[in-house]
Structures are given as C-alpha cells and as structure tokens.
Image: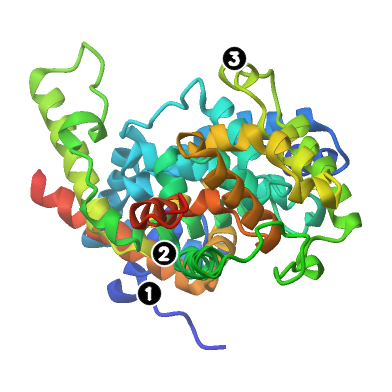
C-alpha cells in the first residue's frame, strides 16, 4: 500500500474535504499534520473557511406568506386531472391566445374545414352525413369518468385552508366535468351547455351563428377553438365566420 | 437538517392519502429550497416559482415514491434540475439581481465598528458576485455543501455526478471564492 503523499499540492486538494468532514480518519490525520506544519496551507485553509463564513452570512429570502396558497392554486390548475381544455380556459387570456405550433396546425385545419363548410354549403349539423364525426377519437367512457374524480382529488388534496381568492373564484372543474360527461348528443346540440365556455373565452362577442359553428366544430373535431381565437378573428375579418 | 425518519414518514403518509403530511413537508422544506434555488437563479420570483414546481412534482410523484434515498436528497435533486434548466433558458441570462439591493451580507450587530460594517457588506457583495460567476454545477455543489449541509454523497446524487466529482467541484468553487475575497481584502 503506497503512502499517501502529503505535499502542499496534494493537501490543497483535500482542504475543502477537510472542512466538509469528508476525509476518512487516516487521511484527515495526515492533512491536519501537514497543515499544522505548513503556514501556506494553514493560510489557504483559513481562506477557504472564510468563504463558508461569508456564505453563511448572506441574506436568505423569506418564504412569502402566500406561497402555499399559490402552490395550491397551481396544483388545482396543473394537477394530473387538469385536461388541456381546462388549462386553456383557466390560463391568462394572453396565454390562451398564444398558439403553439400544434395549435397553429390545428387552427389551419379548422380554418380549412370552416371554409369548406361555408363555401360548399354543407350542412352544419354534425349528425348529418358528410360531416367527419371522429367519434373514435373521443375519450372512452371509462376515461371520462376518471377525469372528474381525479380533478376533484387534486383540489381536495391541496394542503391547508382554502385561500380566499381561490374559494371565491368560480371553480372551472365542474364545467369541464359537465362538458366531458355530457352524452354525445349534448356535445352536438350544445348551445345551452356551452354557454359558460363562450363567456369565458370571449366568444360571446361573436354573432350567435358563429359561436354555434365554433362550438359545433369543437364537438365534431374534438378541438378546442378557445385556443384558436386568433384564427377565429382572422375568419371574422375574412367574412367567413359570419357567413358573408 | 431534518431527520431521515420524519421526512420519509411524512412522504409515506402523504402517499397513503394524508394531505396534512404534504402541507407539513412544504412548511419544512420551502425555506431551505427557496434559499438554495435563489442562490442558483438569483431571481426571487423565479425561485418562488421553482419551489412551487418542486412541490408540484412531489405531489405528482407521491404514488411512485419509495424511500430509497433521503427525502432531502430527492428534493434537492428535483430543485437542482429545475434550477439548471432555468439557468439555461435564454431569458434568464439577463436576470441579475443587484447585490447592493438585497444580496449582500446582513449588517453585523451595532457594536461593530464602521469599518467592520463596510467590510462585511463589501465582502458579502463580492461573494455574491463571485458566486454568480461560478459555473452552474460548482455553484450548486458549493451551495448544497457549504450552505445546505449535504454530504458529498448526497450532493453527488442531487447533481448526478460521482462523489469524486463533487469533491473537485466544491474545492474549485471554494478556491475561486476565496481568491475573490482575498482581492477584496
């Protein structure tokens, strides 16, 4: 077993470990012995120790009183049960309007569908033949029944007392649950059930027939046009969405 | 430092559905995590966001949690990854908190001389600046070791490097700060 070198160069690499009490007992004895005999290494050790003292003296931020409240709100929003549709409607307006690459692609597809429907005069009733109803794409009933359960669980499991701001704000989950649990016909004949969503999304500024078209397309294409308000505005500008 | 049993017990209780246990873990660890992440990202608002993100991940992972390592090591690993990711975002590179505002060392007690007060403040500000200039992993290793009190083995796990690497990271970081403080004195 070769003897561990104890020259300054080697000891220097162990000084931090000496401070952190990370040397094994034998090595610690060697390093201490060297430091006791070497003023340069002793000075270096003092400087390294001083770093820890200065770091310990730096101010640390206090945890904000409402940090747990904000955490609870985020847990309710981004919890495992939060659906993309839910997130889109609870996000700040600017976020809702920001299109992702996927959203833009979806928007273009929807625009094409709208333009085709309007220009070719196809029936808007999704239950009629000719309208691509992708019922296979809709979530299975079992999956739907799980969503509200876990969504409520996320909220219920949020720790601590319910914050005022959260308690008083309308809970978006029931609306999501209601929409997802609605029987298939309701997804097509939706105007009454979807009215709150139109208010949330700002669609209520549009003519009724356009709102109906948007909601119908949402139901048929399983797309959330709330995320494509920019596109909708373009359609309105083009005179497509208002039937011109 | 909290005991191993208490934190693991709380997490296991949370896994079993005890919501209050999660609340307690948050109360115990939000402070140390905020201090650590703030040292890393040097932006309090971002640090607060990341602390929340750590606990969101804990919340999500509760059913998969198994006490293979110390709870604190697991937390700091999540926190480190989030902080390093944040530091690599372009928008963060321009974020620097002035050390004159709130990063400098707190003033010593009133019995200290004016010279001591000035020295302490200058050294604190210098340490803050030097800390910011360290490579990310050196900064993380030094903060976890010297401030948070983790062992090299725990830091190695948090940073996903070897213990030998941690020893080197910590020593280089400490030496850099020592050199900077020497210049200030």
Q: Quadrant of the N terminus of chain A?
A: bottom right
Q: Position of residue B15 (x, y in %)?
A: 83, 44
Q: Is residue A131 above or below residue B43?
A: below
Q: Position of residue A52 (x, y in %)?
A: 35, 45
Residue farthest to the bottom, as pictured: A1
Q: Which mark is residue B180?
A: none
Foreground mark, 1 or 3, reads 3
Q: Which residue is mark 1?
A: A6
- The residues tagged by marks 2 and 1 sit, at their Cα atoms, a distance apart of 7 Å
Q: Is residue B103 above or below residue A40?
A: above
User: Residues at marks 1 and 3, common chain?
Assistant: yes
Between A119 and A219, the one nearer to me in the picture: A119
Asked whether the viewer can see residue B13, the reply is yes
Q: Which residue is mark 3?
A: A164
Task: Please report the residue visible at 75 percent of the width from the left and 69 percent of the height from the top.
Answer: A134
Between B54 and A79, the one nearer to me in the picture: A79
Estimate how packed mark 1 is, as few (under 14), some (14 to 19) or many (20 or more) residues with alpha carbons within 10 Å: some
Task: Please report the residue visible at 55 percent of the width from the left and 53 percent of the height from the top.
Answer: A225
Image-quadrant location for residue A133: bottom right
Q: Position of residue A235 (x, y in %)?
A: 41, 56
Of pointers 1 and 3, the one earlier in the residue sequence: 1
Numbered disc 1: secondary structure? loop
Question: Mark 1 belongs to which subunit?
Answer: A
Q: Which mark is residue A31?
A: 2
Of pointers 2 and 1, the one earlier in the residue sequence: 1
Question: Mark 2 belongs to which subunit?
Answer: A
Of pointers 3 and 2, the one earlier in the residue sequence: 2
Asked whether the viewer can see residue B147, the reply is no
């Amino acid at each position: 077993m070769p003897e561990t070198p104890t020259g300054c160069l080697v000891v220097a690499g162990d000084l931090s470990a000496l401070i952190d009490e990370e040397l094994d007992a034998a090595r610690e004895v060697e390093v201490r012995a060297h430091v006791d005999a070497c003023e340069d290494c002793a000075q270096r050790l003092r400087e390294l120790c001083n770093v820890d003292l200065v770091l310990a003296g730096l101010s640390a931020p206090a945890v904000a009183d409402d940090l747990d409240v904000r955490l609870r709100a985020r847990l309710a929003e981004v919890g495992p049960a939060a659906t993309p549709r839910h997130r889109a409607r609870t996000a700040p307006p600017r976020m809702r309007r920001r299109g992702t690459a996927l959203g833009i692609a979806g928007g273009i597809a929807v625009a094409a569908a709208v333009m085709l429907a309007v220009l070719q005069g196809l029936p808007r009733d999704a239950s009629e033949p000719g309208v691509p109803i992708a019922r296979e794409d809709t979530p299975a009933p079992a999956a739907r029944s799980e969503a509200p359960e876990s969504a409520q669980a996320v909220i219920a499991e949020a720790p601590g007392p319910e914050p005022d701001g959260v308690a008083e704000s309308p809970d978006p989950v029931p609306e999501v649950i209601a929409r997802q649990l609605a029987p298939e016909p309701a997804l097509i004949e939706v105007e009454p059930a979807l009215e709150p969503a139109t208010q949330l999304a700002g669609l209520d500024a549009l003519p009724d027939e356009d709102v109906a078209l948007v909601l119908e397309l949402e139901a048929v294409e399983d797309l959330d046009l709330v995320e494509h308000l920019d596109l909708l505005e373009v359609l309105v500008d083009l005179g497509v969405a208002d039937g011109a | 430092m909290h005991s191993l049993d208490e934190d693991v017990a709380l997490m296991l209780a949370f896994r079993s559905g005890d919501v209050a246990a999660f609340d307690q873990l948050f109360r115990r660890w939000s402070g140390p995590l905020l201090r650590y992440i703030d040292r890393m990202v040097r932006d309090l608002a971002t640090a607060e966001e990341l602390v929340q993100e750590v606990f969101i991940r804990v919340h999500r992972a509760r059913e998969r949690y198994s006490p293979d390592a110390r709870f604190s090591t697991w937390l700091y690993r999540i926190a480190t990854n989030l902080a390093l990711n944040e530091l690599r975002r372009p928008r963060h590179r321009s974020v620097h908190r002035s050390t004159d505002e709130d990063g400098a060392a707190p003033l010593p007690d009133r019995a200290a001389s004016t010279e001591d007060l000035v020295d302490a403040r200058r050294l604190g500000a210098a340490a803050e600046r030097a800390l910011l200039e360290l490579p990310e992993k050196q900064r993380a290793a030094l903060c976890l070791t010297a401030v948070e009190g983790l062992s090299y083995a725990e830091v190695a796990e948090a940073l996903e490097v070897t213990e030998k690497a941690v020893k080197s990271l910590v020593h280089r970081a400490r030496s850099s700060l020592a050199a900077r403080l020497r210049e200030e004195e």
